[in-house]
Amino acid sequence: MQTLKIESKFFNPKDTLECGQVFRFKPYQDGYLVFSLDKCCYLYKKDGFTYIESDDVKYFENYFDLKTDYQKIYDNVKSYNVEFLTNALEFGKGIRILKQDLVETAFSFIISQNNNIKRIQSSIEKLCEALGEKRSFKGETYYAFPKVEKLAEKDVLFFRELGLGYRDAYILEFAQKLNGGLDLNSFKSLDTPSLEKELIGIYGIGKKVADCILLFAYNRSDAFPVDTWIEKVYRENLGGLEKDRSKISLELQERFKNLSGYVQQYVFYFKRGVV
């Protein structure tokens, strides 16, 4: 077991995990157990520091994006001098945008569409329990995210019985495409608009899901996912007039450029939690 210790000013476990970017975590002791692929860590805050305990701290150092200078991001977002945005920034400055696994993130956000967070978490947990390898960490049992081949060998009824609803067909076809040779890593060299186009070409992935995959797995900070909460922010707090969500996303991307993803997380978390 190894431990990393980081100042918590720009790395708050609650802010980072509960801002809507990830679903595989649960409360544990003074913090959270966080699961990614077949790995687990204990994440907690104490006396102004955030701690990561894991058997693979190098993996989680990358996962939590610990090498990025969030002071610089904070200063750049604050420089817009927009009251609502500044308030959102102060409220959620402990957020770090995670560097999640491509395949796990894609499946998770396909499941997330038209869904609430508790149900998303439950569905993913059931999927892991049904098809993932059993593991243990700090005496707690957990299950790895399933291998693609395990997912691909099932049928629509299997996923429906896990409570995935109409998403069952999306999950099955996506698993079969991945098992048949679709390589999400091969898209990494593309610019963001081209990469988004490739993702939207996959059955079950629309613009919002594609933008979430871009931001949370491909680390494209120029992506700006738009859902109900962001639409409210756009109209009620940023003075926007556009009604089409795709056009809202493009307008916000143009406004915030490579800070788009960070701004999206700050305002989403703030709007949902406070305003």
Image (cartoon, rainbow, N blue to C red):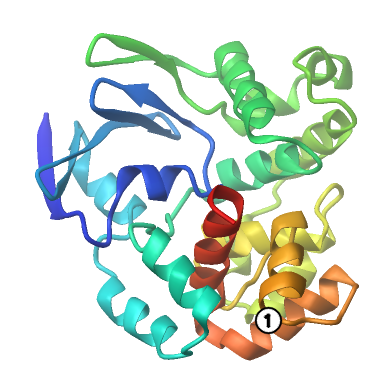
Q: Is residue 212 above or below residue 108?
A: below
Q: Which residue is drawn at 54% across and 49% down?
A: 273
Front residue of this view, candidates 55 and 52: 52
Residue 215 falls left or right of residue 181: left
Instruction: Examine the rendered structure and indicate whether residue 262 appears above or below residue 104.
Output: below
Can residue 175 be seen here? Answer: yes
Is 60 drawn above or below residue 251 in the view shown?
above
**Residue designated by label 1:** 252
Whether residue 221 appears in this view of the structure is no
Quarter containing the N terminus: top left
Count how many numbered circles sit on residues in the image.
1
Q: What secondary structure is marked by label 1?
A: helix
In the image, residue 130 sits, relative to residue 78, either above or below, namely above
| Residue 6 x/y as whole percent | 14, 54
Q: Which residue is drawn at 29% across and 81% down?
A: 72
- Amino acid carrying mark 1 in the image: Leu
Please indicate whether residue 273 sits to the left or right of residue 16 in the image.
right
What residue do we see at 77% from left, 67% from top?
Answer: 198
Residue 120 drawn at (x, y percent) = 66, 31
* Residue 146 x, y percent position in the rendering: 57, 26
* Label 1 CA crowd tier, 10 Å (few <14, some 14–19, many 20+): many
Q: Which of 201 and 125 is in front in this view?
A: 125
Question: Which of the 4 image quadrants contains residue 224?
Answer: bottom right
Q: Which of 109 and 19 is in front in this view?
A: 19
**Quadrant of the image containing the C terminus:** bottom right
Residue drawn at (40%, 50%), measured in percent from left and top?
16
Residue 8 % position (x, y)? 20, 54
